[in-house]
Image (cartoon, helix red, strand yellow):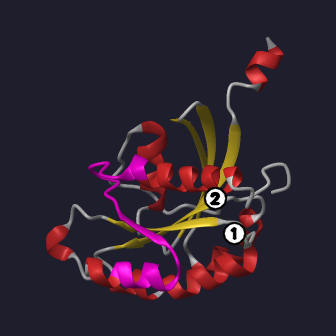
Amino acid sequence: NHARQMSSYTYLFKFIIVGDSNVGKSCLMLQFTDNKFKSDNDPTIGVEFGSASIKHNESTLRLQIWDTAGQESFRSITRSYFRGAIGALLVFDLTSRESFTNLANWVEEIQMCASTNLVIILIGNKCDMTTQQEITIEEAEDFAKSKGLIFIQTSAKTSHNVEKAFRAVAELVVERIDKGQIDPENE
């Protein structure tokens, strides 16, 4: 029985969610792991943790998701959480110009702390709030392109593209493993 349990997934990936405070990182994780939305979410202190499995072709991918605090004071803590991460969702709030402006710092932070093989995708959250949007899709796509990232708009509230975002990261990781660019034993 133990052996069967061990092989209940093909790969185990550690994902991190990073970005400013209040962009919806915890809500994205909760929507993906529990199909729930909490509108009164308290700020994350340090790190929260969730997990979920997705099917990809014949494989089962187990995702361990680490949701980091966006507050500046936690930056030093969160560095250690980059260790062993193979996927990252870099999140900004489409209704907050500031969270978009800070993305460049986040990319720098990630590049300093994470493995060079880290697969990062850019998430513009709160796409349901169309009237309050401060960032155009073109701007977001241009930024993503300049950093070599895929851009996906999500809404943690309506669950629009939430699974798609996590799935996109996981599938890119698998693709790189298949191409031999990532050695899962080594990461």
The C terminus: image quadrant:
bottom right
Q: Provide residue 3's location: percent of width, then percent of height.
A: 82, 18
Asked if marks 1 and 2 touch (Cβ < 8 Å), the reply is yes
Disc ID at residue 78? 1
| Stretch in magenta | 140-164
* Of the image marks 1 and 2, the number of the one nearer the N terminus: 2
Residue identifier under label 2: 47
Left/right of residue 149 with respect to residue 72 in the rendered view:
left
Above or below — where is 121 with respect to 10?
below
Q: Nearer the viewer, residue 26 or 112?
A: 112
Q: Is residue 137 visible?
A: yes
Q: Residue at x 53, y 87 (%)?
A: 104
Q: Residue at x 28, y 82 (%)?
A: 138
Specify the amino acid type for callout 1: Thr
- Mark 1 burial class by Cα count in 10 Å: few <14, some 14-19, many 20+: many
Above or below — where is 25 with respect to 34?
below
Q: Is residue 157 magenta?
A: yes
